[in-house]
Image (cartoon, rainbow, N blue to C red):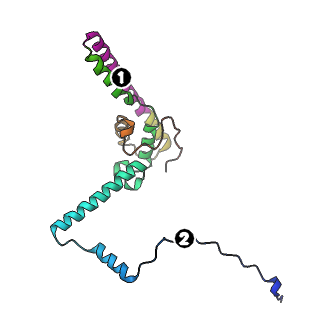
């Protein structure tokens, strides 16, 4: 019914620029087949088989070590995977633990015990025993607080093994923990871990 004139033609939308592709040319069929054959090539001798297995193990352990540093759960060990375990790690890492002070206190008590004075050695032993008492109280407090938090955040998840996981992580010095700590001491934790 209505005819458009050239001046009334609809404006053509300019297509949005596409993001760059893979950054390399597509391999030719010959190259792709050669690469597939090289990957599928079975080792001929026992020595080649051992070398190939060693390379695979080294690559796997490199990926696991890197994931432990960066927090990439794809390569974690099965004991460290899942939102519950991630929450436990963050919960333990976000709180100050008296276990951090055990090593310096032990050094001080060693110096006091080798000072030659029985009185100073006795004071050092009292300090050390007091420190161990504080650590035990701290671990018991950690257990009860963790159970309460897990019940609130993960009501349907099984909690078997969570106490041991938290206690074993909290008994390590913070710089030695693996996977590496992703939160700082005192940092608030997110509400969702799914």
Q: Position of residue 121 (x, y in %)?
A: 28, 14
Residue at 35%, 53% in the rendered image = 64
Disc 1 from disc 2: Cα separation:
60 Å
Q: For residue 89, say whether it is visible.
A: yes
- Seen from the viewer's position, the closer of residues 116 and 4 is 116
Q: Which residue is mark 2?
A: 20
User: What secondary structure is marked by label 1?
Assistant: helix
Q: Is residue 157 visible?
A: no
Q: Is residue 161 left or right of residue 9?
A: left
Determine the residue positioned at 33% across, 21% down.
108
The answer to whether 163 is drawn above or below residue 16 in the figure is above
Residue 131 occupies quadrant: top left
Q: Nearer the viewer, residue 179 or 50?
A: 50
Q: Which mark is residue 141?
A: none
Q: Which residue is mark 1?
A: 131
Residue 122 image offset from top left, x and y in percent: 29, 13
Q: Secondary structure at mark 2?
A: loop
Magenta stretch contains residue 124: yes
Q: Verify whether residue 134 appears in magenta.
A: yes
Q: Residues within 10 Å of mark 1 (few under 14, many from 20)?
A: some
Q: Which residues are magenta?
A: 116-144
- Lateral position of residue 150 relative to residue 114, left or right: right
Q: Residue at x 23, y 73 (%)?
A: 42
Q: Main secondary structure of the magenta part?
A: helix
């Amino acid at each position: 019914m209505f005819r458009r004139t050239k001046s009334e033609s609809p404006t053509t939308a300019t297509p949005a620029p596409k993001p760059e592709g893979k950054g390399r040319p597509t391999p030719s069929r010959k190259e792709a087949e050669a690469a597939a054959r090289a990957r599928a090539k079975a080792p001929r001798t026992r020595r080649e088989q051992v070398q190939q297995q060693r390379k695979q193990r080294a690559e796997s352990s490199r990926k696991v070590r890197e994931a432990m540093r960066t927090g990439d759960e794809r390569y974690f060990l099965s004991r460290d995977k899942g939102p519950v375990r991630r929450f436990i790690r963050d919960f333990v890492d976000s709180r100050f633990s008296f276990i951090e002070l055990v090593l310096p206190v032990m050094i001080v008590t060693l110096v006091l015990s080798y000072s030659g004075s029985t009185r100073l050695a006795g004071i050092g032993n009292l300090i050390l025993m007091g420190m161990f008492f504080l650590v035990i109280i701290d671990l018991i407090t950690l257990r009860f607080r963790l159970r309460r938090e897990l019940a609130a955040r993960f009501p349907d998840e099984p909690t078997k093994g969570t106490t041991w996981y938290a206690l074993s992580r909290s008994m390590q010095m913070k710089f030695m923990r693996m996977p590496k700590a992703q939160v700082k001491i005192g940092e608030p934790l997110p509400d969702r871990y799914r």
